[in-house]
């Protein structure tokens, strides 16, 4: 556990030393001792977890001190230690928020020691509850984290809402980094299954020869290395949602076994004979065109139709318009808050630079760009020169694409040069040897 701060407020120096000596026997306790009430109040910035408070102090009485502390820090635990044996006094202190009231006698030290142990356990438990609440709050707001106002993302929200009302399987498509797992989480945590497990499996991240045992689980001795029974992902997700990411990467031989699980709604561990009934919602995702994979013969048609369910397509970030700036501000605020930094605004130049980039890595790349920009910035706002784009995927920008026209390539080349030269139209016109008026016209028509 972390250090635990305790204040002793006691005007009798001998009794105070005795309390301090006893409490310091626990090396995790950080103990401060004060003779006066005002000294205690002046040091509350140390945020003690427990205060032992004498009833009679030279500058103010314990009741006054208790009231002032509770006004500032109502959660702070205060134990009154007094030679006053009057029951009405004790009741008054307890009504006004004291954790306990001890009369000074030979048992006080032991009672105080045990009470502090209990308080510390309660504080630790509250901390664990808060952490869980934060995690759940983050998960339940997964849909809200799909920020944006573009028609494309609005449609995604509408489809998520429809998905949450039923148990239909869902297939999510979209480029890498566009937020497919976030959609899967939103569907789960905003549905009736939200209190049950959400289990994610990246099919591309697990070696093919291990994927079957990962999904189905196995019995002890089923194969070399199976030293104990292990439940598979199907079992782990039972009652909840199983998210199979990069489903197109699944080996064709394993696809037939997945199909059987979908049809029968049951699973048997490798090397076992017991049948385990399943109640699972399947959500799958891919950055490929599954129907094209079916035509190629790399994905089973019957499995495709079983998994298709409600299809949700996530648009690439470059097609989401002003959503780029909405997300950029969100990522900036989040990063600054997490690192205890002042919020950063965006200059006009920074906004233009962000809007004119094509984001091959989508939302994931935008987050990385913004976080780096904040780290590199020395100003109150992010400037154009703070925004830098990685060289990743640059060589892929101009690969032959049957869907693109010559004008598409021209616009792409111009956009790339504008990114490299901070949207300076005059410089780009010179570099590409084209008229400035041509670039101005294209900018006015929003072609670049």
Image (tube, grey):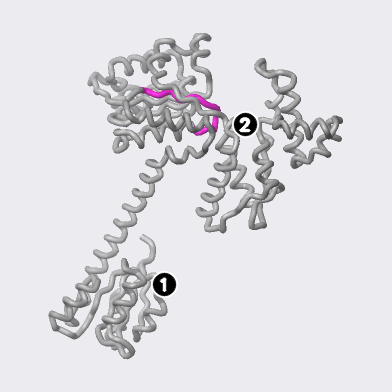
In-image side of 132 versus 173 (left or right): left
The x, y position of residue 6, in whole percent, is 34, 73
Between tags 2 and 1, which lies in front? 2
Q: Residue at x 70, y 21 (%)?
A: 399
**Residue 227, visible in the rendered structure:** no
| In the image, residue 375 lies in the stretch drawn in magenta | no
Q: Secondary structure at mark 2?
A: loop
The one nearer the camera, 20 or 160, is: 160
Is residue 340 shown above or below 181? below
Q: Which residues are magenta?
A: 169-179
The x, y position of residue 311, in whole percent, is 44, 22
Q: Residue at x 44, y 11 (%)?
A: 300
Q: Mark on residue 46? A: 1
Of mark 2 and mark 1, the one earlier in the sequence is 1
Of the 4 image quadrants, the one containing the C terminus is top right
CA separation, marks 2 and 1?
Answer: 49 Å
The one nearer the camera, 339 or 145, is: 145
| In the image, residue 174 lies in the stretch drawn in magenta | yes
Q: Crowding at label 2, few (<14), some or many (≥20) Cα neighbours within 10 Å?
A: many
Q: Which residue is mark 2?
A: 360
Which of the 4 quarters of the picture holds residue 126? bottom left
Is residue 268 shown above or below 145? above
Count of marks overlaid on the render: 2
**Residue 50, visible in the rendered structure:** yes
Q: Residue at x 64, y 48 (%)?
A: 373
Of the 4 image quadrants, the one containing the N terminus is bottom left
Q: Main secondary structure of the magenta part?
A: loop
């Amino acid at each position: 556990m972390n250090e635990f701060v305790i204040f002793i407020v006691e005007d009798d120096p001998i009794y105070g030393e005795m309390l301090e000596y006893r409490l310091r026997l626990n090396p995790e306790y950080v103990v401060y001792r004060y003779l006066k009430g005002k000294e205690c109040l002046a040091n509350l910035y140390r945020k003690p977890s427990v205060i032992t408070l004498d009833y009679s102090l030279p500058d103010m009485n314990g009741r006054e001190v208790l009231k002032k502390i509770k006004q500032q820090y109502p959660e702070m635990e205060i134990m009154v230690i007094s030679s006053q044996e009057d029951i009405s006094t004790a009741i008054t202190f307890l009504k006004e928020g004291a954790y306990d009231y001890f009369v000074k006698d030979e048992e006080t030290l032991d009672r105080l020691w045990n009470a502090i142990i209990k308080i510390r356990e309660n504080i630790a438990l509250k901390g664990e509850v808060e952490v869980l609440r934060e995690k759940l709050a983050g998960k339940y707001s997964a849909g809200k984290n799909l920020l944006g106002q573009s028609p494309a993302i609005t449609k995604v929200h509408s489809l998520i809402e429809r998905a949450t009302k039923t148990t239909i399987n869902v297939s999510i498509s979209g480029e890498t980094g566009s937020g497919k797992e976030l959609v899967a989480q939103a569907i789960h945590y905003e549905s009736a299954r939200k209190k049950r497990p959400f289990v994610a499996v990246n099919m591309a991240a697990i070696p093919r020869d291990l994927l079957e045992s990962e999904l189905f689980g196995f019995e002890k001795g089923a194969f070399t290395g199976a030293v104990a029974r292990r439940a598979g992902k199907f079992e782990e997700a039972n009652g909840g949602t199983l998210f199979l990411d990069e489903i197109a990467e699944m080996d064709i031989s394993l696809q037939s076994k997945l199909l059987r699980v979908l049809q029968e709604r049951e699973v048997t561990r490798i090397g076992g004979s017991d049948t385990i009934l399943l109640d699972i919602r399947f959500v799958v995702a891919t950055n490929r065109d599954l129907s094209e994979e079916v035509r190629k013969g790399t994905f089973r048609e019957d499995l495709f139709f079983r998994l298709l369910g409600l299809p949700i397509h996530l648009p690439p970030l470059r097609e989401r318009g002003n959503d780029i700036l909405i997300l950029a501000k969100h990522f900036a605020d989040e990063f600054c808050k997490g690192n205890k930094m002042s919020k950063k605004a965006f200059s006009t130049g920074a906004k233009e630079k962000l809007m004119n980039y094509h984001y091959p890595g989508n939302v994931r790349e935008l987050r990385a760009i913004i976080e780096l920009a904040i780290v590199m910035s020395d100003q109150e706002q992010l400037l154009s020169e703070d925004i830098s784009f990685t060289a990743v995927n640059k060589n892929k920008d101009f690969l032959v694409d049957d869907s693109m026209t010559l004008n598409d390539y021209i616009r792409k080349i111009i956009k790339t040069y504008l990114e490299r030269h901070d949207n300076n139209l005059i410089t780009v016109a010179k570099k590409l040897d084209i008229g400035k008026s041509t670039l101005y016209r294209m900018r006015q028509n929003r072609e670049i």
